[in-house]
Image (spheres, rainbow, N blue to C red):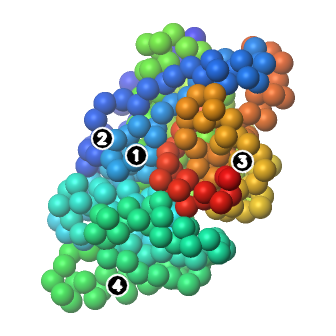
Amino acid sequence: MNSTIKSAKDLGRLYDLPRARLFTGTPPIEAMHNLEKTLSTSCNLFIKRDDCTELAFGGNKVRQLEFYLGEAVARQANTILITGAVQSNFVRLAAAGARKLGMDCHIQLEERVKKNNPDYYKSGNVFLDHLLGATMHSYPEGEDEHGADQQLKTIAEELRLNGKIPYIIPLSPNHLPLGALGYVVAAQEILEQLYAQQISIDEIIVASGSGATHSGLLFGLRALGSNIKVRGICVRRAATDQMSRITDKCRKISTMLDIKNPVVKSDIILDDTFLAPGYGQAGKDCVEAIKLCARTEALILDPTYTGKTMAGFIHRVKSLNAGQSFLFIHTGGTPAIFAYMDDLA
């Protein structure tokens, strides 16, 4: 079994910070016996179903938004602003969370992915953004985090002049990663589930994009005394660049919680083997992983995050002969698959 779970006091100020509850219940941890059989592995494979976080098709961003929107409510905001890629799960869920709390939402979509397929610009998350009644904006650059944030500030100022109280969910890593706290909470939840189900896990594998989920989960596990390895599969940038992001976010989490940072450099494990051909684009291994999981476990994965992460998960499992146990974090992204039908055909 995994190490004894420490108490919530080991997470510092976590439960004193503003939080808007956006889902109920506990996403399950399930065994993936069909995938084990198909891969002919003696490893034990499990999945944490954070695609089941209820709000508007769910996903990891629901946990993150609880802290951003909690702060927005505390500031008496009535309009949420957020920026992201065209098929961003984060902006879709920000719009949903805003509506759930009776707020308006302004979404700014960035041109991060070069796609000629018209479905990419009108289906999936984009369709849901419109259905949720978000006010849409565009930003021409896909790798200009500071510029995207600055344009949000410009929009926010216009809203203030019209009597609105805006709250910006920032993109740039220069800001405190409030959303990462959602996965500090998740770390405690996962340890409690593993204890209750009498499951021992050697390694957790999770997508590493913005780094909020990866850093929050890793920080939470270490703060609670768990030494389970956390392997981040890079979906946005190379491992060398991602390393500094995860390191910085862990440092900022310790500041927000007012506790010592329990994460050391050797804790941060990154794999960018499946990043190609780039962010938001599906490579061969990614497509194969998506199809395999649909046909063995009825799991719907997406090409940007979970598909690449599952490709890394499968590769990791195949590289080991011993009967170790692995946990895959399903971070959602289900609607985006409809924008990639040509890639998956």
Image quadrant where residue 11 sits: top left
Residue 55 percent across, percent down from the top left: 33, 47
Q: Nearer the viewer, residue 328 or 269?
A: 328
Mark 2 and mark 1 in contact (Cβ < 8 Å)?
yes
Q: Nearer the viewer, mark 2 or mark 3?
A: 3
Mark 4 and mark 2 lie on one chain; the one further toward the N terminus is: 2
CA separation in Å, label 1 and label 2: 9 Å
Is residue 138 left or right of 77 when viewed as pictured?
Answer: right
Residue 106 percent across, percent down from the top left: 33, 74
Q: Nearer the viewer, mark 4 or mark 2?
A: 2
Q: Nearer the viewer, residue 192 or 14?
A: 192
Q: Residue at image x 76%, y 24%?
A: 39
Residue 134 percent across, percent down from the top left: 31, 71
Q: Secondary structure at mark 3?
A: helix
Q: Nearer the viewer, residue 202 or 292?
A: 292
**Does residue 325 sit above or below 187 in this rendering?**
above
CA separation in Å, label 4 and label 2: 29 Å
- Name the residue that disc number 3 marks: 286
- Name the residue that disc number 1 marks: 58
Mark 1 and mark 4 lie on one chain; the one further toward the N terminus is: 1
Q: Residues within 10 Å of mark 3 (few under 14, many from 20)?
A: many
Q: Secondary structure at mark 4?
A: helix
Mark 4 and mark 3 lie on one chain; the one further toward the N terminus is: 4
Q: Amino acid at mark 2?
A: Phe
- Name the residue that disc number 2 marks: 23
Q: Nearer the viewer, mark 1 or mark 2?
A: 1
Q: Nearer the viewer, mark 1 or mark 4?
A: 1
- Name the residue that disc number 4 marks: 155
Q: Amino acid at mark 3?
A: Cys
CA separation in Å, label 2 and label 3: 29 Å
Mark 3 and mark 1 in contact (Cβ < 8 Å)?
no
